[in-house]
Image (spheres, rainbow, N blue to C red):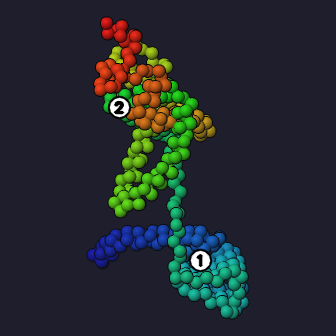
Amino acid sequence: MGAGARSIGAALVCFLPGLVIAQGASRANLSRDLERLSKGELISGLPPADSVSPGPRTIPAGTTVRGTVVAQGPIEVLGRVEGSVVSLAGDVTVHRGGVVGKDAVAVGGHVNADSGQVLGEIRAMSALPALLGTSPAVLDVRTPAQRTLYATKLVACTFGVLLFVAAGVLLFAGRNLDEVVATIESQFVRTFWFGILGQLAVLPALLVLIVACVLSLIGILLIPFAIVAYAIAAAGLITLGFLAVARLVGGALWQRGDGQDRMRALGALAMGIALFFVLWMVAALVAWAPMAATVVRAAALAATWAAVTLGLGAAILSRAGTHRRVAGAVAGRPPELAAWQTPTPIAGIPAARRTVGAARERR
């Protein structure tokens, strides 16, 4: 007897976890089926999954059920059901004297209601339709302190990445940045309107690029690469323009004259970026108060948008800082004398006139 009891215990230990898992999976499937009935078939008043037992169900004559009846098997209706009747694995039969107040639905079966009454719709289907775009709601269970800490870390990391990018721009594209800054100083209003036009033309320009690629067989193959290159170019223009605005704003406060030019430019750039990120940091610090965080975040978004718009317009006007004549001509800087220009007459070409100041300097 002891050996038999141990064998039975071992069998229970082996099979009980499987039974529990299978029962849990069945409950999960039933919950999804009930969700499909509620959203896909618009069946109201459905009971919870725990109250739906497998097997057939019968509504006796002379009884009334308030609500919807759901069974994992055939359903026999001899009494009255004020709601709907749904069979998930069988037929629905409404006998003489039976009444269904709403719909009669049979999944994997048929609805027989020749002798009874169904006041709603009669529907028979092989399977429930799948729901598209439905996902369980994700609740934010973090505490206010955790949300504040997360927002603060996000702002600090973004500031660090942008500062690293700014150092790289100063190192490898410092002259381009100078020209964009000069363009903002000389054509402030024009750069702002060009920035708005540039934002409005982002998607149309991408569509034009795709259409141009479609016109040729090789271009069709290059469409993914063209889209990626376009996105990188647009992001580069926006970043260059924003850094130019940040340097211009930070330069008004960073007035230190010591050190090298690059270090002064880096200090002004870091100061400008920090000024823009102050509002975002304040919004992160008040994340525990949703209303205050929304107001501060709106102000930070407006300031950032204005800076991005102004910088994008300057980057477009100066061709990413490569069209140096735009900023130089307006700022009043004289163009440099080209190497091929000479005051000596050549084959009937008149000699270039030399200014009085330049002649005196040569003497």
Front: mark 1 or 2: 2
Residue 254 in sight? yes
Amino acid type at circle 1 is: Val
Q: Which of 325 and 18 lies nearest the eye of the viewer?
A: 325
Sequence-earlier tag: 1 or 2 = 1
Residue at (35, 10) in percent of width and height: 359
Q: Is residue 331 above or below residue 144?
A: above
Q: Quadrant of the N terminus?
A: bottom left
Amino acid type at circle 2 is: Ala
Question: Residue 246 location in percent, x, y?
Answer: 47, 28
Q: Is residue 269 above or below residue 294?
A: above
Task: Report the disc number at residue 172.
Answer: none
Mark 1 Cα-neighbour bin, 10 Å: few <14, some 14–19, many ≥20: many
Q: Quadrant of the C terminus?
A: top left
Task: Report the disc number at residue 173.
Answer: 2
Q: Is residue 234 left or right of residue 297?
A: left
List the residue tagged with mark 1: 70
Question: Residue 137 location in percent, x, y?
Answer: 53, 57
